[in-house]
Amino acid sequence: MTNALSGKVLVIGAGGVSHAAVHKMAMNSDIFTDITLASRRISSCEAIAASVLERTGVTIKTAQVDGDDVAATAALIRETGAELLINLALPYQDLHLMDACLEAGCHYIDTANYEPPEEAKFEYHWQWAYQDKFKEAGLSAVLGSGFDPGVTSVFATWIRKHKLDTIRQIDILDCNGGNNGQAFATNFNPEINIREVTAPARHWENGDWVESPAMTTKVEFDFDGVGPKNMYLMYHEELESMKTHFPEIERARFWMTFGDEYIKHVTVLENIGMTSIEPVMYEGKEIIPLQFLKAVLPNPGDLGALTKGKTNIGDIITGEKDGVEKTYYINNICDHEVCYAEVGSQAVSYTTGVPAMIGAAMMIKGIWLDAGVWNTEQLDPDAFMDMLNEHGLPWNVVELDGPVDF
Ligand code: NDP
């Protein structure tokens, strides 16, 4: 099959997720024929480029750009001739990068929904508002092609296509059973991670959002490959897109595991105000406590060599097939040390970076390239699911005896 796009891509952001994704793109140079990696600091890009060359023999180009500068990013798109921009910077850049794509006539993909910097709000409406602009420009934007969101939505669509006629309830279970030996560290960008876990929990039930205080609903679950872990009810952005795109869903919940030490540290940091995003004056200079905290915490990208153990992320879905109730558990188990040996990333970066590469490949191949703005559960899952198996994230599906009892 000939590809729909040339394979010239511009990746924005050169952190942990980008490191994994760009290595996997270079390993698939028949699809990604010309890669430019640009970020706020050129040094971040050069470090990834050097590792890519050493591990894969592929030379990628690097550039410096502020993704919040629409004109500069549009100019870089034109200069590189990129037909697809892969946004692996932070959620704050999403709208500016979508604007740059519209200005320069480039397709777009990301891994996280837009968040306004001054408010920890995880909602799709800002990006969904670009629907008409992308349609009119004949361009495609795929939102949230990481693991969660991303694979968890594709899993649901695949179950809906092949196993069930309707989805009644869905529980997304995200377990990181890895240990990095640190007293406290986050496994992706600390600022984004802490904003997410300290936000109130919210799930969808019978046509409405049900809110509860952060980290108060806890269930122990025995994860394959990891063992029993406490998981906590949280809000996560794919709940909004899934309840919209599977309108029959009665209940949608998201759970993430955290160890007691992690909870203890977050609780203390929150109690003393260190997780706040309200600016404070310190010695005549305005600082944001959470951004200062990020500066003193370990860099998640540096934890790869130290992290041992596995992740296990998936969906438990109950619905009906031919009038009979059925429940399926579909998941992927990923080993931190195996990921590190392959691309030099821990499994959280890897499980996000590989689906970003696959989503981009789906667009280049023309399988996911209709004009408009799409969440991954709206797109055909089959080729994406095949690529997960081929590119390091094999999945497993089993039928359970009945719906979850928690
Ligand atoms: P990092 O903090 O490691 O990397 C972010 C990168 O973005 C850095 O290289 C940084 O710049 C760059 N950047 C920040 N601001 C700008 C800007 N204005 N212009 C250009 N570049 C900028 O984050 P992660 O790699 O951990 O996360 C990347 C994204 O992935 C986030 O949006 C996160 O929410 C998402 N994510 C999604 C998951 C999923 O499953 N869907 C899971 C985990 C993360 P520099 O280094 O150059 O200074």
Image (tube, helix red, strand yellow):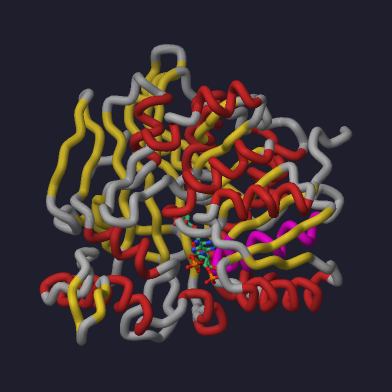
Residue 22 shows in this picture: yes
Q: Position of residue 33 (x, y in %)?
A: 84, 52
Number of marks present in the image shown: 0
Please state, as top left, top right, bottom left or bottom right, where the N terminus lies in the image. top right
Within the magenta stretch, is there residue 260?
A: no
Tell whether 174 sits left or right of 68. left
Residue at horizontal 18 percent and vertical 56 percent from the top: 214
Query: Vertically, is 316 above or below 194?
Result: above
- Residue at 21% x, 25% y: name it: 206
Q: Is residue 162 left or right of residue 279?
A: right
Q: Which residues are magenta?
A: 13-28
Q: Quadrant of the C terminus?
A: top left
Is 88 located above or below residue 379 in the figure?
Answer: below
Q: Can residue 402 be seen by looking at this rendering?
A: no
Residue 204 appears in which quarter of the rendering?
Answer: top left
Q: Percent position (x, y) of residue 59?
A: 83, 68
Residue 359: x and y in percent read: 64, 43
**Which residue is at the front of the view, 144 or 331?**
144
- Classify residue 186 by image quadrant: bottom left
Image location (x, y in percent) of residue 167? 39, 25
Give the residue drawn at x 42%, y 20%: 166
In this rendering, the answer to whether 60 lies above or below 396 is: below
Q: Is residue 216 left or right of residue 324?
A: left
